[in-house]
Image (spheres, rainbow, N blue to C red):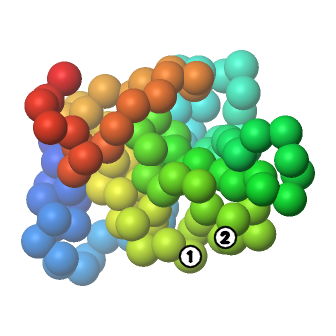
Amino acid sequence: MSPEDAAIAYDAWLDGREGFDYAALVELALDLYARRFPTQAPYRAFSTERCGGPDYKKHKMDVYCTFCRGLLAGRLPMMAKPVSHAKVTKHTTGCALACLANIREMKPPGTRGLIDEDRALPD
C-alpha cells in the first residue's frame, strides 16, 4: 500500500466512513513495524508494562501504543483487557493509518511518551 492510499484511508477513518478494512490495515502497519524493529517481534497494536511497586497485589499495568509509543491508559488492573478500552482501539487504529501514510513516525521499542491528544506542545 502506498502512503497516498494510506492517507486516503486515514482521512476516511477520521471522517467515520466505512469501505476500508481497518483491521487489515493495522495488521499491515504491524508487519511494517516488525520489519523496521525486528528484535522484539511479533507485535500487537499496543504493549503493556507492569507498574505498581514491589507488592504483587498492587501491580497495575500501563498500556502504550506500539506505533508512536505513547501512553494510552495508565495503571489499569492487571486483569483488564486493554483491547476492550475504546481509547486503546481508536488510537492504535488511527496511529497505524497515520504511520502508513507517513504522517507520523514509528518510534522504536522502549521509547515512551504521550499521545497527541495528551501533549500540551507538539514534538
Dot 1 alpha-carbon crowd within 10 angstroms: few under 14, some 14 to 19, many 20 or more: few
Residue beneath the point at 14% across and 37% down: 120
Identify whether 115 is placed above or below 89.
above
Q: Is residue 99 visible?
A: yes
Which of 24 and 96 lies nearest the eye of the viewer? 96
Q: Is residue 116 above or below residue 110?
A: below
Q: Nearer the viewer, residue 60 or 6?
A: 60
Q: Position of residue 28 (x, y in %)?
A: 48, 47
**Label 2 SS:** loop
The amino acid at mark 1 is: Ser
**What residue is pinned by disc 1?**
84
Residue type highlighted by circle 2 = Lys
Of residues 54 and 77, the one nearer the viewer is 54
Q: Is residue 59 left or right of residue 64?
A: right
SS assignment at label 1: helix
Residue at (60, 31) in percent of width and height: 34
Q: CA distance from mark 2 to mark 1?
A: 6 Å
In this figure, what is the number of numbered marks? 2
Quadrant location of the N terminus in the rendered image: top left
Check whether the beta carbons of the residues at disc 2 and disc 1 lie within 8 A of each other.
Answer: yes
Residue drawn 52% across and 45% down?
64
Which mark identifies residue 81? Answer: 2
* Depth check, front residue: 11 or 112: 112
On the image, the x and y values in percent for residue 47 come to: 62, 45
Crowding around mark 2 (Cα neighbors within 10 Å: few <14, some 14 to 19, many 20+) is: few
Q: Quadrant of the C terminus?
A: top left
Quadrant in which residue 103 is drawn: top left
